[in-house]
Amino acid sequence: MADIAASMLAADPLRFGAEAKRALDAGVKRIHMDVMDGLFVPNLSFGQAFVKALHEAEPGAAQDVHLMVENPARYLSEFAEAGASFITVHQEATPHLQRALAQIRALGKKAGLALNPSTSLEGLKYLLDDIDLLLLMTVNPGFGGQKLIPAMLRKVADARELIGSRPIDLQVDGGVSTETAGALIRAGANWLVAGSAAFGAPDMAQALASMRGGS
């Protein structure tokens, strides 16, 4: 079994608040906010104002803010104030990663570390005491609706072995669907970020239940 975070990147942008409520009503445990700056990834999405608006509309919802931006340390305080529950930064985007992770926790938020598909797990063993969530990108970040990179299943399994019994969420993002969820869960993921597979499903609750159970 795994829990689901719904990626708002796949939501109808004209019905942002209603789409978040639809996902929460369907059973998602977290709202995943993909923040893109057009530099770290070749796309632009949304920023602090959306996080704040959603927090005000759904104050009980946990927001998992995934910063796909250059030099994310510049924005940590702003997203914390906006209502983020988790703030995740990319290893590839900051030269002072441990400092950024410590700052997130100092702001009273859960600290997440994200790795792109080609980024090694080698540095992870030095940061396990600094994170609450490890996010493995199972596609190259920047666009929704991509297919899972098969080699990432081995990476998920390797990450699970490194984490061991530590209370760290192992989350995967990219290509998650009813067809791939089972393999990702068996590899060791306990959180799945679902975008198109959730918001594009005829019955979101049914799709979420299927992915959560890995069937």
Image (spheres, rainbow, N blue to C red):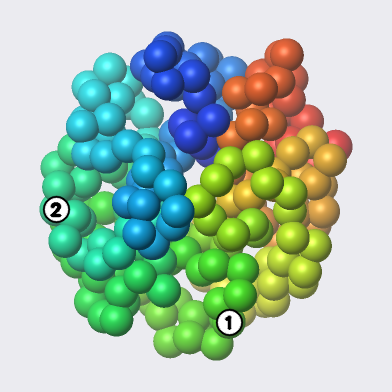
Q: Amino acid at mark 2?
A: Ser
Using a 10 Å C-alpha cutoff, classify the residue at mark 2 as few (fewer than 14 neighbours), some (14 to 19) or many (20 or more). Answer: some
Q: Earlier in the sequence, mark 1 or mark 2?
A: 2
Q: Is residue 46 above or below residue 107?
A: above
Using a 10 Å C-alpha cutoff, classify the residue at mark 1 as few (fewer than 14 neighbours), some (14 to 19) or many (20 or more). Answer: few
Task: Provide residue 149's location: percent of width, then percent of height.
Answer: 74, 60
Label 1 sits on a secondary structure element that is loop
Task: Provide residue 158's location: percent of width, then percent of height.
Answer: 69, 76
Which residue is painted at 27% across and 34% down in the image?
Answer: 51
Residue 153 lies left or right of residue 133; in this view the side is right
Badges 1 and 2: C-beta atoms under 8 Å apart? no
Q: Which residue is mark 2?
A: 77
Q: Is residue 132 visible?
A: no
Label 2 sits on a secondary structure element that is helix
Q: Which residue is mark 1?
A: 120
Identify the image quadrant of the C terminus: top right
Task: Provide residue 184's location: percent of width, then percent of height.
Answer: 75, 54
Residue 171 lies left or right of residue 131; in this view the side is right
Which residue is painted at 59% across and 18% down in the image?
Answer: 26
Q: Is residue 114 visible?
A: yes
